[in-house]
Image (cartoon, rainbow, N blue to C red):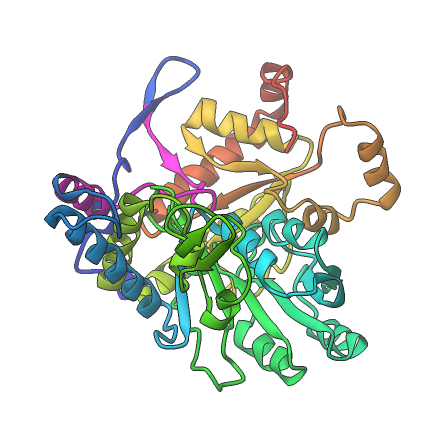
Amino acid sequence: MDFFRHPVNLRNLVVGVDMKVPLSNGAFVKAINFDNAATTPPFSSVIQEIIDFSPWYSSIHRGTGYKSQFSSSLYEKSREIVGKFVKSDPKRDTVIFVKNTTEAINKLSYRLCEDHKKCVVLSTCMEHHSNDLPWRNKYQVDYIALDENGRLCLKDLEHKLKKYDGSTALVTITGASNVTGYKNPIHKIATLVHKYHAKILVDGAQLVPHVPVNMKPWGSLEHIDYLVFSAHKMYAPFGTGVLIGPKTTFEKGDPDYVGGGTVDMVTHDYIRWSAPPHKEEAGSPNIIGVVALATAIKTLNYIDMKYVEAYENNLTSYALQRLSNIPDIELYGDKEHYGDRVSIIPFNIKGIPHHMVATILSYEGGIAVRNGCFCAQPYIQNLLHIPLDEVKKRIDDPTADHPGMVRISFGLYNTYSEIDTFTNFIKRIIRYKKFYLEKYKNIDPPKI
């Protein structure tokens, strides 16, 4: 593991990693956070930059005062930092700041086609709800199938591109699944999509924080047309997301959200919209969130995304090997190929409900995980092989418990010793299964 040493102790770069949390018996223990796919703690550099910037905080694009000019300049320079991080084209692409990935996808869903009814959007059966639901009420949506391991079936993608014969406006895929961690071959998919004269959107919420991402040059078949991601999953939790795409997409038509900052000229019977990206950023911009994101990117560049990818991949392989040797552990998806996934592992313990496992880990061990369907219910239903009639029963009975899994997900600050602590506690839960089932039998499961 010497290869994975870094000149800086990465835990020192992250806030709160040594915090102690209370257990059910009243004792305190150092918290272990294995819920990074949901959100990450902030970098210390991000917190410090916010503190340093705060005395200069002012309105954006609206004032002649020095602080306003300083804040506006910093805001616009942050677009350059974000665009450069994923190698977008500064001349042809626009970087739009939004609240999160969900808002970014919703925004594009309103602007993609002038005549929605004539456009087909191909999504996949492994998407987060945020990359599925926004398309349903506007376009003809079809879903790319999965193979037996829950990976995207590229043959079915090409079949559907042929089927719709030029009507496909967009193929929208996750860069990495928030359930299994599988990385989709985005550039191979882009090549196929462009062959059939469609465009590609990559939901980068789980990809951008963990691996180097390159949108590739315009003119390349591998080019990523649209990319979205969230700051709160990359150590900058201050309410900012990013939508990157061609300026031409946002030049025509009305923005989905209108108001101050979106217009160039207004009368009672006339509106001339501002040019993108300002046209798409109604209201007072979240300068604090943007500064936080830019600082997080600088820190990730300092660490080196290739190192982040290698280290987290090694953590994931180590954890999978440890878990696969524990009886009664059910691992989902491809259990052999570790290299093409980000640091996410879903599992269950036979005989113990997923919500109870998560509760026991927290209450008894101070270990934070996530359980449920992870806002990807169709994918969970597929991976768990739940029959359609069983799904229908749950539709008819809203009070029924949802099936689900337990998910662990690592950040760049997690350690092998934390994985050892976690897997040892899993063994303890299995060894004393009857005791824990009785103790936590009245814990209500979550409904999502």
Q: Position of residue 361 (x, y in %)?
A: 49, 29
Q: Could you tell me residue 199's position as x and y percent?
A: 59, 73
Q: Is 181 on the left or on the right of 211, as rendered?
A: right
Give the residue displayed 41% in from the left and 76% down from the top: 92
Does the magenta-highlighted stretch encompass residue 37? Answer: yes
Can residue 32 be seen at all in this image of the molecule? yes
Q: Quadrant of the N terminus?
A: bottom left
Range covered by the magenta-colored residues: 29-54
Q: Quadrant of residue 294?
A: bottom left
x, y percentage for residue 58? 20, 43
- Seen at 49% across and 65% down, the residue is 250
In the rendered image, which quarter is residue 191 located in?
Answer: bottom right
Query: Where 256 falls versus 176 (above or below)?
Result: above
Q: Residue at x 50, y 73 (%)?
A: 224
Does the rendering let one see residue 314?
no
- Judging depth in this view, the residue of 70 and 260 nearest the camera is 260
Q: Residue 399: x, y in percent?
A: 75, 24
Please tell me whether residue 209 is drawn above or below residue 346 in the rendered image.
Answer: below
Image-based side of 235 in relation to 337, left or right: left
- Residue at the spot x=33%, y=67% of the render? 85
Magenta span includes 173: no
- If the image is split into quadrants, where does the C terminus sit? top right
Q: Is residue 406 left or right of residue 306?
A: right
Q: How many marks?
A: 0
Residue 304's place in the image compared with 266, above or below, is below
| Residue at the extreme right | 389
